[in-house]
């Protein structure tokens, strides 16, 4: 509302249509305009409208406030802005009331400020540079030449026939370098140029292999002799690569470095023996890798195990009178004297005392044989006394517990510092698989699970390999293995490392030496990932060979069982097919042909899509 004695100068001008004007204004001023109880024209010289950015804002949240039809482009919007500005400027030059006369001042001619300054101070745009693209400053002089033609009708209304002005700003203010990565292992650079000045475009091709020369990632990829199905590949190359990994990549001073070296040594042995191994071969490898053979201290059998009380045990020590024979035994007895007394006790029919004497003097052979000819309870009692003399971490304990039909305690507690090295325990289980095969299998798997729970991934995977545990997938966390020597419970970037994929491919190669038609189906997706890394590092020919190898495996199966993998292999192969060295030897008219395996893979994918 306006005060008494003042008129609203805004109504002296013809109201501009809301959908035809395009001056800049702030969102704060725009939000006031939507309230019906306030004057929507405060601080707006030329009507109300929204900026190009605000149109999208209100169109998303206020559909009824859209400023134009959906097909309206920037050219029309900027043209409508020129119309609004020019219309106001025409009225101002014709002698109409100016903005300064509407401020309520009486007398004198007010000084008219710059139009650019008015727009900047009114908050219609946050960028003066952006305003200067469309508004001409009229402080010093006024340009009477207006865009378009004007027709003055008898009614006094003005109609504008606009002339299109290409005022759309450039996407980039200055020429710049554009680049992209090519499928052939190249980096493509489009250097900056000025086509309007007659300059020709300058395109440069750079080899990614040359750019990345000397980097650790490229050297790691180039050192590997893959793919390991080439006709010119010899297994000596694979063995040499494994030995280099042991020398340069494994720290023997750490437990994890020793476990990692053990996996590489196992692959060397597996490759030399064409993928075939027995338990004794692995046991020999385990004992070679042991830093030192543990010295397990023997213990005296507990008194309660031999059935004697403490005072009775003390009475039978050397130097005291033997109540049975009536003799005083010497302080130090020889082996012959010990056996002689064992025999004398049997003379008198004291078999129980003879067993106690034999157990106390470490005559376990005599004691076990004698008890085996007695009742089973006595035999079990002597056997328990014998095992009590062994250290808890002694591998003999593991063997005896396994032969007794129990899961060895070492399989449940290995990996701790108190238990020492886990390798001798696994070696004794692998070399003595007589008896229950299922029990042997469960004991080895349990040892692997125990090691995995304590973070010894390489050691756990070695146990899983000995138990013939199959490989699974990264997404299935219940699977025990996905990539050899890498835990699939960590993030994928750390899990699918280049070294882990290379180690897994060597294991698959060893399986091929034993069974030429064998393959690891879950591993094929990691081969595709490895091929992508080769292409990214400027090695497209090797990447294409991996695609061919994966395609061969999928075509042996039904590609419809792995449709996503088949399609991704086909897409990568189509980008890399021109990197095939055989293609360069073909006549020019035949270079458009594709490899047979790629055509077959595409046909299978199309058939699957149709089904």
Image (cartoon, helix red, strand yellow):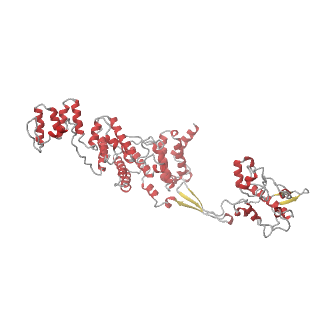
Q: Going by the picture, which residue comes out furthest to the right? A: 154
| Residue 133 in view here | no
Q: Going by the picture, which residue comes out furthest to the front? A: 4
| Residue 372 in view here | yes
Residue closer to the observer: 199 or 64: 64
Q: Going by the picture, which residue comes out furthest to the bottom? A: 140
Q: Position of residue 183 (x, y in %)?
A: 54, 54
Q: Residue sitting at 31 percent across and 34 percent down? A: 436
Residue closer to the observer: 2 or 555: 2
Q: Residue sitting at 45 percent across and 55 percent down? A: 221
Q: Is residue 206 left or right of residue 52?
A: left
| Above/below status of 608 relative to 97 | above
Q: Based on the displayed image, in which of its 4 quarters is residue 399 positioned? A: top left
Q: Position of residue 79 (x, y in %)?
A: 77, 57
Q: Is residue 146 left or right of residue 57?
A: right
Q: Position of residue 86 (x, y in %)?
A: 81, 61
Q: Residue sitting at 53 percent across and 52 percent down? A: 578
Q: Is residue 126 left or right of residue 597?
A: right
Quadrant where the image shows the N terminus:
bottom right
Residue closer to the observer: 351 or 339: 351
């Amino acid at each position: 509302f306006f005060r008494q004695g003042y008129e609203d100068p805004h109504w002296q001008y013809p109201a501009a249509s809301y959908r035809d004007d395009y001056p800049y204004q702030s969102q704060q001023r725009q939000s006031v305009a939507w309230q019906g109880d306030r004057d929507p024209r405060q601080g707006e010289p030329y009507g109300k409208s929204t900026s190009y950015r605000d149109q999208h804002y209100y169109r998303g949240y206020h559909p009824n406030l859209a400023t134009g039809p959906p097909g309206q482009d920037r050219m029309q919007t900027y043209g409508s802005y020129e119309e609004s500005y020019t219309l106001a400027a025409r009225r101002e030059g014709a002698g109409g009331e100016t903005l300064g006369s509407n401020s309520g001042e009486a007398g004198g001619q007010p000084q008219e400020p710059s139009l650019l300054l008015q727009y900047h101070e009114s908050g219609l745009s946050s960028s003066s540079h952006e305003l200067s693209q469309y508004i001409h400053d009229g402080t010093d002089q006024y340009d009477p030449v207006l865009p378009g033609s004007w027709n003055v009708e008898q009614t006094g209304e003005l109609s504008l026939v606009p002339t299109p002005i290409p005022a759309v700003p450039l996407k980039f203010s200055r020429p710049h370098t554009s680049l992209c990565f090519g499928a052939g292992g190249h980096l493509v650079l489009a250097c900056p140029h000025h086509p309007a000045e007659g300059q020709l475009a300058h395109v440069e091709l750079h080899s990614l292999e040359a750019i990345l020369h000397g980097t650790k990632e490229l050297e790691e990829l180039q050192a590997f002799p893959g793919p390991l199905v080439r006709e010119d590949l010899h297994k000596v190359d694979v063995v040499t690569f494994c030995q280099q990994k042991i020398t340069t990549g494994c720290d023997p001073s750490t437990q994890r470095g020793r476990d990692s070296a053990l996996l590489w040594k196992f692959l060397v042995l597996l490759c030399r023996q064409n993928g075939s191994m027995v338990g004794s071969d692995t046991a020999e490898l385990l004992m070679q890798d042991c830093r030192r053979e543990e010295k397990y201290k023997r213990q005296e059998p507990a008194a309660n195990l031999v059935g004697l009380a403490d005072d009775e045990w003390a009475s039978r020590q050397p130097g005291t009178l033997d109540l049975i024979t009536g003799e005083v035994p010497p302080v130090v007895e020889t082996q012959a004297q010990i056996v002689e007394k064992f025999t004398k006790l049997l003379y008198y029919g004291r078999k129980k005392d003879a067993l106690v004497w034999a157990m106390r003097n470490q005559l376990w052979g005599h004691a076990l044989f004698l008890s085996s000819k007695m009742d089973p309870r006595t035999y079990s009692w002597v056997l328990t006394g014998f095992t009590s003399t062994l250290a808890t971490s002694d591998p003999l304990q593991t063997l005896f517990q396994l032969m007794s039909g129990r899961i060895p305690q070492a399989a449940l507690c290995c990996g701790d510092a108190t238990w020492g090295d886990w390798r001798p325990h696994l070696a004794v289980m692998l070399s003595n698989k007589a008896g229950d095969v299922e029990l042997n299998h469960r004991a080895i798997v349990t040892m692997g699970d125990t090691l995995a729970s304590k973070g010894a991934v390489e050691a756990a995977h070695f146990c899983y390999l000995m138990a013939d545990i199959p490989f699974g997938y990264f997404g299935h966390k219940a699977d025990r293995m996905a990539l050899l020597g890498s835990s699939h419970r960590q993030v994928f970037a750390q899990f699918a490392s280049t070294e882990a994929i290379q180690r897994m491919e060597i294991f698959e190669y060893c399986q091929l030496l034993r069974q030429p038609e064998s393959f690891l189906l879950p591993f094929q997706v990691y081969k595709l990932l490895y091929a992508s890394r080769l292409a990214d590092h400027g090695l497209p020919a090797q990447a294409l060979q991996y695609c061919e190898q994966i395609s061969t495996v999928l075509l042996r199966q039904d590609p419809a069982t792995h449709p996503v993998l088949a399609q991704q292999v086909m897409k990568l192969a189509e980008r890399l097919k021109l990197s095939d060295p055989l293609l360069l030897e073909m006549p020019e008219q035949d270079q458009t042909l594709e490899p047979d395996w790629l055509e077959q893979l595409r046909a299978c994918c199309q058939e699957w899509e149709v089904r």
